[in-house]
Each structure stands twice: as structure tokens, then as C-alpha cells.
Image: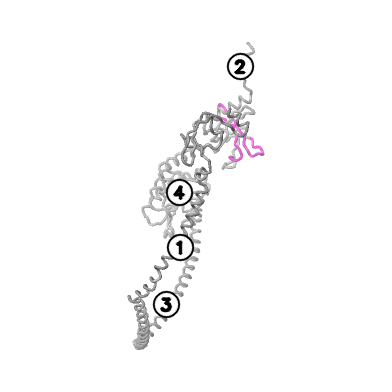
Amino acid sequence: MSASAANSRDVYSISRLNAEARAVLEGSFPLLWVEGEISNLAAPRSGHLYFSLKDAHAQVRCALFRAKRQLLRFTPDNGDQVLVRARISFYEPRGDFQLIIEHLEPAGAGSAQRAFEALKNKLQAEGLFDAARKRPLPAFPRRLGVITSPSGAAVRDILQVLRRRAPHLAVTIYPSQVQGAAAAAELHEALAIALQRADCDVLLLTRGGGSIEDLAAFNDESLARSIGSAQIPIVSAVGHEIDFTIADFVADRRAPTPSAAAELISPDGEALNRTVAAYLQRLLGALRRRNVQDRRQLERLQGRLHRAAPAGRLRQHQQRLDSLDLRLLRSMRERLRSQGQDAAVVSRRLLGQSPLSRLKLLAQRLAPLPERLDQAWHHTACRCAEQLGAAARQLHAVSPLATMQRGYAILRRPERHTVVTQVAQVAVGEQLEALLVDGRLALRVDRIAPDSPAAEKDHR
């Protein structure tokens, strides 16, 4: 084999091989449910668990990390038959195929959990868990119906809370088994009786804590559908706070414990008494303030009534009439005096506006105007004549004609009428025109004689 063929081979290192194998395995499988028997269990101080799951023909290594282990509700041991939800992984340093455990439970409970999840997903898809269909609880219920075992601890806890918070609230207990094979049917029947009687404002479906198997009756599909179609608000309080059943999801409200359900349903009597007492004090205060206001209003009305008596009103009108009479006399005198003064002013103004008087005044004003006009005209004419003479003298001083009278001429090009001022502007043989005081001459340049020799050389 040639060296070039050997160099073209793609040779994997062990690390690369394991890394690519891990990528293929972890990217090819979703989360899986796996059932098997625990063996070779190891629990180091890190809190993680390492073990193998086996059946009759094979085994696989597993790792359960501490965060997930803390969620377990039991302690696994060698020989336990368990159901795990895991993802496939590959431990590169040793090249081991393994499962990373996300959830672990006893295998017997696994089938029940799967059935629970399947029913939960089914009812959720039908909308039985939607918040929009849940009914609000009454603020002040008159009667509570409790569906539970009459001999259980749950009913005693509920009654104890109600005696403390709402002793006036009537309670009807609809007895039923809460665990066992017949429990689901009895719960369904007790709920049907309570709904048919319809004498309760709210129903409570409850029992104390227990294992998953103990709570199985509350995961019944028929019971869940009856809860969902009920016309009376239903509260579910099954097991402990960490326990969830199908009834909890379908019910209008879920309480973590029976005692919490009793507090949720019943109004707090002591708080209501304090609220009523506060409202009573506010009402009494408002009544006292209103009483004071009404008494003051009555006193004001009595005073007005006394002042509005006929005799008193007659005297007031008489005094007002006398006052108006005096004011009328004073007003008439003042008006006559003011009108007399106005008449005198108008008379004086009329005399001043008489046509004869105005004509005399205008004649006096017009008499000196002709003489003043003649004086102004003579003065203006003299000033204009002086200004015209001065301007003519200035114009004659700068006039080209005056310059040409002294023997000068203006030299220009005839075709463009441009004035020639320097010899550098013309060339030999060029036609020019000379303007004199009494006419013009046509000239031709035969020779140019500049003042400087350099300029003369240039023209040559």
C-alpha cells in the first residue's frame, strides 16, 4: 500500500469515536419509559444514584442525579421493580451506554400513573379543565354539602374549622366510601343525590391523604364528567397538598387539604363581625353628623320664617319704599342738574359751530396765504437756479467736450466703440477713429512708438 493511500484514511481517535457515538445516540431517541429491576445500586456522598436496570436477558447502566432524586416519594433499593422515564446517553470516558433518569416510580404504580396521564390529557383536550367554564364560589353560602366518609378525619377537620369561622353555616354530609373498589361508584352516586336535591350552595368533595392507590377513586372518568356538568359549584380537596387527582382539575376550585377547603368556602365570622362593627360605627357617625346638620338647617329655616312674617315683611317693604322714594328724588335732582350742564355745553358748541363764525375764521386764515405763496415760489425758484448753475459748472468741468476744446481727442475702435488708452491695446495696420470737438477722423496705425524700449521691442 502506498504512503499516499495510508495518509488518505480517516482514522478516529477513541475520544472522537465516543463523542460521535454519543451525539448519534442522544439525538436519535426521545424520552423513554423503561421497566426493569434495580441491581448494583450505589449511592455516593454526592447525592447521585448509580445502578443497573435488568430483565431476564439484558441490563443497562443508569444514573439518577441528586436534583431528580430529591423528588422521589420512596427510597429505591436493589431488587425493586421500577418504571423510569429516561433519556439515552453515552458516558464517553468509559464508552458506556447508559440511561439518565428523569423520573422513577415503583412499577406497580407506573400503570396507574400512565392511566392517570392518559385520562388527564383526554379531559383537558375536551375543555373540562378550562378556567372559563369554572363557576365562582358564593361569598356567603347558607348550606354546604360534604361528600366524604362520615368516619374519616377529613370531616372532623372540616366541622372544626366551620365551628370556628362560620357556626351559622349548615352542613349536609353525603356519606360515601373514599377508597377501595366500590369507592368511585359511591362517590358518583352521592354527588348525583346532592345535585338532585339542590339544597346546597356549594359542594365539597374531599378525603384525607393516602397513597396513589388510595386516591384512585377520585380519578374516575364518570365522576369527573359529573363534576364538570354540575350546576352547583364544587370544591375538591383530596389528599395532601402535593396530591393531585382528576377531580381536582375538573372541580371549580381545588384546596390543598380538607381544612383549607373549609376556610376557602366559609366566610370568616370574626372578620365579618369586625367589618359589621366598623360599618355600624361609620353609620352611627354619619347619623350623628346628619342629625347635627338637620338641626342647624331647622334653626336657619325657623329664623327665615320669623323674618318672613307678614308684619315684619310689611315694615321692611315700607322702609324699602321710603328709601326708594328718597333715592328717586335725589336721582331726579341730579339728572336735572346734569342735563342743564349738558345743555350749556351744547349751546357753546353750537355757537362755535355757527356758519358765520366759521366763515370769518376761514377768511382770517386765508388772507395771508397768497403773499406767503408768492414768497415761497420766489425763494424756491432762486434756490433751484443756483443749484442748476452749480451742477452745470461741475458737469462742464468734467465734460469730454471741454477737454477736447483744449486740443485733446478720444481714440477708439470704430466697430466696437471701445476707447483706446494704451499703445499695448492696438497693432500696426489697425483702423482707429479719433473724436474731435467738431467731428471725427478715420486713422490707420502705421507705427507704434511706446515710451519704454522694452515695450517697443515687444510691439515689433
**Where is residue 290 drawn, in percent x and y?**
44, 74
Q: Circle 4 sits on which residue? A: 177
Give the amino acid type for the residue marked by disc 4 in the picture: Gln
Q: Secondary structure at mark 3?
A: helix
Q: Which residue is mark 1?
A: 379
Q: Which residues are magenta?
A: 42-68
Measure the C-alpha gap from mark 4 to mark 2: 77 Å
C-alpha separation, residue under disc 2 versus residue under disc 3: 111 Å
Whether 172 is among the magenta residues is no
| Badge 2 amino acid | Ser
Camera sees residue 260? yes
120 or 88, nearer to the observer:
88
Alpha carbon distance from label 1 to label 4: 140 Å
Question: Sequence-wise, which precedes: disc 1 or disc 4?
Answer: 4
Comes first in the chain, label 1 or label 2: 2
Q: Is residue 47 magenta?
A: yes
**Considering depth in this image, is 319 or 99 the residue closer to the camera?**
319
Q: Is residue 308 visible?
A: no
**Mark 2 — residue?**
8
Q: Nearer the viewer, residue 409 or 9?
A: 409
Q: 430 left or right of 15?
A: left
Which quadrant, please, contains the C terminus? top right
Please, is residue 108 above or below residue 239 in the view? above
State the CA–CA distance, disc 1 to disc 3: 99 Å
The residue sitting at the top extreme is: 1
| For residue 198, side relative to residue 71 (left or right) | left
Q: Residue at x 43, y 50 (%)?
A: 252
**Residue at image x 49%, y 53%?**
391
- Type of the residue with mark 1: His
Front in this rendered view, residue 16 or 31 = 16
Mark nearer the viewer, 4 or 3: 3
